Amino acid sequence: MLKVQDLKKYYLVKKWPDEAKTIRALDGVSFHLPVGKTLGVVGESGCGKSTLARTLLHLETPTSGAILWENQSIAEIGENNYRKNIQMIFQDPYNSLNPRKRAIDIVCAPLQVNTNLSKQEIVDRALELLLKVGIAPSEAYKYPHMYSGGQRQRLGIARALILGPKAVICDEPVSALDVSIQAQVLNLLLDLQETLGLSYIFISHDLGVVSHVSDDIMVMYLGKAVEQGPKEELMRAPMHPYTRALWASSPSMDRPKAKEALALGELPSPMNPPSGCSYHKRCPYAEPMCREKAPELLPHGKTLVACHFTDKLKQNF
């Protein structure tokens, strides 16, 4: 349904009048999102996840690469038609809603702009969807500040779904919620996916949350995919040291602590990325070759991995 091919997004930042730096926020990302499936995108803050979301929505124009919807480019199907098919649930349910509008008005607005339905038809459809996400009609005429955090995120979900999209980008939709509420919202998203046949791109820094909802997972680091493949395979035996660091850092009572659990240092600046493999300064397995040559994303079993020493790491897992 959605195909992304070698997607790149670069920003030119002027540090001084005569000096400029290029930030490679996305540097050649490719994936395929089938109908009714979920692609989890995981990585630290600054790895390019949110830039990917904005670029997929065409809020940011790609520097290069292709975004294909049902094998057609955005130019061929038209930007308005494309955006009706792909919507977004934002991370912050506090700041992503207009505090001056009631819930019913927030959900009705996309229908008022994009359809020729009568006022009553629009209200009826909005109330039906709000009920489906867990907001009763009697609660639909409140302002956002009158709801709890979980209810606000349910309202954001309703707004994203009101035009009947086929794909939804979930940009850390539960990170701002209490743990008990996170489970409710995640289960709601899974129920809606099954009922409506939705495809999700689920973005998070938490590999545990991503593994709960995803069919496939893509691990990003400094704008690139370093590992991607089926959830079961990637969680059973992650092959990239960075994936292992994320995996080992997830809370577990019975999982042995791996040497990758604490990645050394902080994420490098995308304005001045390391030479060769972008992860080599933090990798416990790095060798001189890693500083000189960037690894390609190549097949290893059922997954794709960008590491020079995948076979060696497989033996040590």
Image (tube, rainbow, N blue to C red):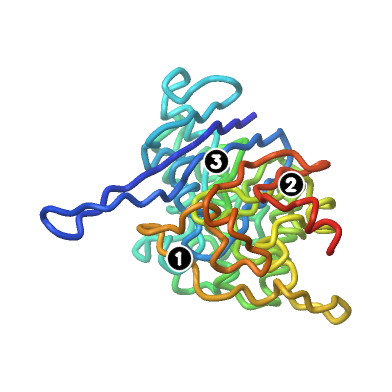
Which quadrant is home to the C terminus? bottom right
Q: Quadrant of residue 33?
A: top right
In the picture, measured across the screen, residue 163 lies left or right of residue 213, that is left
SS for tag 2? strand
Q: Residue at x 54, y 26 (%)?
A: 68
**Label 1 packing within 10 angstroms: few (<14), some (14-19), many (20+):** some
Q: Nearer the viewer, residue 173 or 221?
A: 221
Mark 2 or mark 3, which is nearer the start of the sequence?
A: 3
**Labelled pair 2, 1 in contact (Cβ < 8 Å):** no
- Residue 69 in the image: state x and y as whole percent: 56, 27
User: Residue type at mark 3?
Assistant: Val
Q: Is residue 228 left or right of residue 56?
A: right
Q: Which residue is disc 3 drawn over?
A: 29
Q: Which sits earlier in the primary sequence, circle 2 or circle 1?
A: 2
Q: Which residue is mark 1?
A: 268
Task: Determine the residue located farthest toward the left in the rendered image.
Answer: 17
Residue at the bottom extreme, as displayed: 253
User: Can you identify the residue that label 2 sits on?
Assistant: 216
Q: Nearer the viewer, mark 2 or mark 1?
A: 1
Chain-order first, disc 1 or disc 3:
3
Tell me what residue is drawn at x 65 percent, y 56 percent: 133
Q: Position of residue 286 (x, y in %)?
A: 63, 63
Q: Is residue 209 left or right of residue 266?
A: right
* 3D distance between C-alphas at marks 2 and 1: 27 Å
Between the C-alphas of marks 1 and 3, the distance is: 19 Å
Badge 3, how many Cα within 10 Å: few under 14, some, many 20+?
A: many
Q: Residue furthest right?
A: 254
